[in-house]
């Protein structure tokens, strides 16, 4: 796993780099936000450790910029800022986690492992005879590949990730379409009809049910 450290305090960088490399991680470090942005545009990292207060470009600005291009790479803030408002601000910018300086290396290591474990669990999703491979962006039914559009793939993945829960049309339009204002949710039904036709499931494989007037629920 390749980790990026964006931190301007040399002592912290040395401490982190040595500890993480001893754990078997490949580690790259840069000392300001602008260099952090530039390298993330060229190199894929599996996780980013990001300081809040950085020269040239703050950690908050960098986090937002990375999220515009990359939705999946876990970002962990390492910072002395710890008010509720600052924590919320960091999470809204796209951070996955938040650890306050000074911190225990063992705690940081465990949080990193948790994020990698969660990523791995999310790579393959299953719903009855349907299998979704997020890493390869592939959907199959009874091991036969099904071609879905990007939006269809996102919608199906969302329902399967929330298996057993009723997903309202309002939730779907916000979480999948990223629309946070009043919008015609009828578009969801159009996409669901397309997904069902392409999956071509048998009657006994009706894994995604319509909850009339509410939304959809996925169940094995």
Image (cartoon, rainbow, N blue to C red):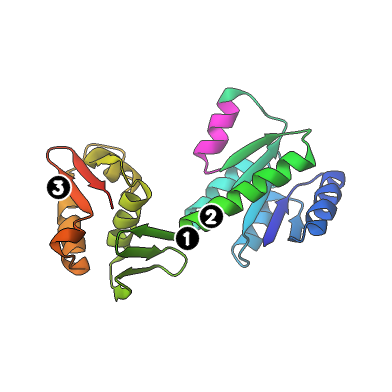
Q: For the residues marked 1 and 3, what is the alpha-carbon distance in whole angstroms?
A: 29 Å
The answer to whether residue 49 is visible is yes
Within-10-Å neighbours for mark 3: few <14, some 14–19, many 20+: few
Residue 156, image x, y percentages: 30, 56
Instruction: State the residue position of label 3.
Output: 186
Secondary structure under the numbered disc 3 in the rendered image = helix
On screen, residue 143 above or below 123? below
Looking at the rendering, in which quadrant would you find the N terminus? bottom right
Instruction: State the residue position of label 1.
Output: 123
Secondary structure under the numbered disc 1 in the rendered image = helix
Residue 75 included in the magenta stretch of the image = no
Within-10-Å neighbours for mark 2: few <14, some 14–19, many 20+: some
- Name the residue at 40% across, 58% down: 125
- Per the rendering, the mark at residue 119 is 2
- Name the residue at 57% across, 36% down: 90
The span shown in magenta is 85-95
* Residue furthest bottom in the image: 144
């Amino acid at each position: 796993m390749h980790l990026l450290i964006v931190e301007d305090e040399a002592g912290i960088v040395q401490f982190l780099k040595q500890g993480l490399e001893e754990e078997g991680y490949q580690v790259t470090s840069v000392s300001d936000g602008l260099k952090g942005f530039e390298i993330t545009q060229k190199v894929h990292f599996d996780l980013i450790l990001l300081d809040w207060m950085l020269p040239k470009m703050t950690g908050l600005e960098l986090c937002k910029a990375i999220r515009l291009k990359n939705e999946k790479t876990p970002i962990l803030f390492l910072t002395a800022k710890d008010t509720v408002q600052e924590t919320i601000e960091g999470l809204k910018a796209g951070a996955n986690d938040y650890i306050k300086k000074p911190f225990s290396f063992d705690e940081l290591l465990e949080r990193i492992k948790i994020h990698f474990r969660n990523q791995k669990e999310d790579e393959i999703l299953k719903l009855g005879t349907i299998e979704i491979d997020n890493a390869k962006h592939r959907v199959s039914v009874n091991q036969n590949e099904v071609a879905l559009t990007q939006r269809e793939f996102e919608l199906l993945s969302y329902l399967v990730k929330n298996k057993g829960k009723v997903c309202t049309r309002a939730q779907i339009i916000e979480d999948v379409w990223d629309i946070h204002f009043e919008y015609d949710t009828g578009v969801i039904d159009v996409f669901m009809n397309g997904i069902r036709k392409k999956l071509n499931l048998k009657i006994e494989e009706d894994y995604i049910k319509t909850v009339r007037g509410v939304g959809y629920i996925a169940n094995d």
